[in-house]
Image (spheres, grey):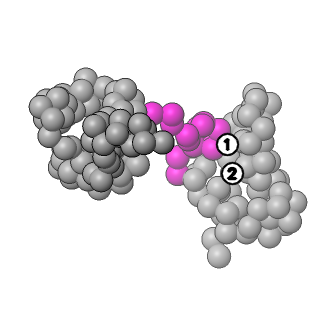
């Protein structure tokens, strides 16, 4: 197996990242890298950090190919929308016009149109979140029992009581 060698510059970069790190979740991956710079094997690092051996190799490869920022930066994004807010409003406009006319607009047909617009496959909860963002709500007529008696029959029944 090919031995991985860290230059002095890389070692200093990792030490500096450990000193400047404020994210608790990033401390362990940085510790794993530091241990590797000190000549520890992946198996020893796995025992110390609690990671799996393959994950240690994955961290090392990620650092070597993409740099320290790939380890220290936050990878989670808050906004995973596929369309901008203005484009979403344009997308919803024809459905809103149909709904205002009294037509029934289903989420499934919206999903199909959304998939065509974005070019990606999405799920129905994605459309529900889109509708929620734009303050859509489910409006339905009040349900009536089809066998409900007429008002005259109800009044006649009450008089007989």
Quadrant for the N terminus, please. bottom right
Q: Position of residue 137 (x, y in %)?
A: 36, 33
Query: In the rendered image, which residue does mark 2 sit on?
Result: 6
Q: For the view shown, which residue lies furthest in the right direction?
A: 48
Q: Which mark is residue 30?
A: none
Q: Position of residue 62 (x, y in %)?
A: 57, 53
Left or right: 68, with 19 as reference point: left
The residue located at (34%, 30%) in the rendering is 136
Q: Position of residue 66 (x, y in %)?
A: 52, 46
The residue located at (39%, 29%) in the rendering is 133
Q: Along the line of sight, which residue is nearer the eye, 48 or 24?
A: 24
Query: In the rendered image, which residue does mark 1 sit on?
Result: 10
Do callouts 2 and 1 mark residues in contact (Cβ within 8 Å)?
Answer: yes
Q: Main secondary structure of the magenta part?
A: loop
Q: For the view shown, which residue lies furthest in the top direction?
A: 86
Q: Secondary structure at mark 2?
A: loop
Q: What's the magenta region?
A: 65-80
Q: Secondary structure at mark 1?
A: helix
Q: Position of residue 78 (x, y in %)?
A: 51, 34
Q: Along the line of sight, which residue is nearer the eye, 94 or 56?
A: 94
Residue 104, magenta (yes or no): no
The residue located at (68%, 47%) in the rendering is 7
Separation (CA) of disc 2 from disc 1: 6 Å
50 to 156, vertically: above or below: below
The residue located at (31%, 26%) in the rendering is 85
Q: Along the line of sight, which residue is nearer the eye, 20 or 137?
A: 137
């Amino acid at each position: 197996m090919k031995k991985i060698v860290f230059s002095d510059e890389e070692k200093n970069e990792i030490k500096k990242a450990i000193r400047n790190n404020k994210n608790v979740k990033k401390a362990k991956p940085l510790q794993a890298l530091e241990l590797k710079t000190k000549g520890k094997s992946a198996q020893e690092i796995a025992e110390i950090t609690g990671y799996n051996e393959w994950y240690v190799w994955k961290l090392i490869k990620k650092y070597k190919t993409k740099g320290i920022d790939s380890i220290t930066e936050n990878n989670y994004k808050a906004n995973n929308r596929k369309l901008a807010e203005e484009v979403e409003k344009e997308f919803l406009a024809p459905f809103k016009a149909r709904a205002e006319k009294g037509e029934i607009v289903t989420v499934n047909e919206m999903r199909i149109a959304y998939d065509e617009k974005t070019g990606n496959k999405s799920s129905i909860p994605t459309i529900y979140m889109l509708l929620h963002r734009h303050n859509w709500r489910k409006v339905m007529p009040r349900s009536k029992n089809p066998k409900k008696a007429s008002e005259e029959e109800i009044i006649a029944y009450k008089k007989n009581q």
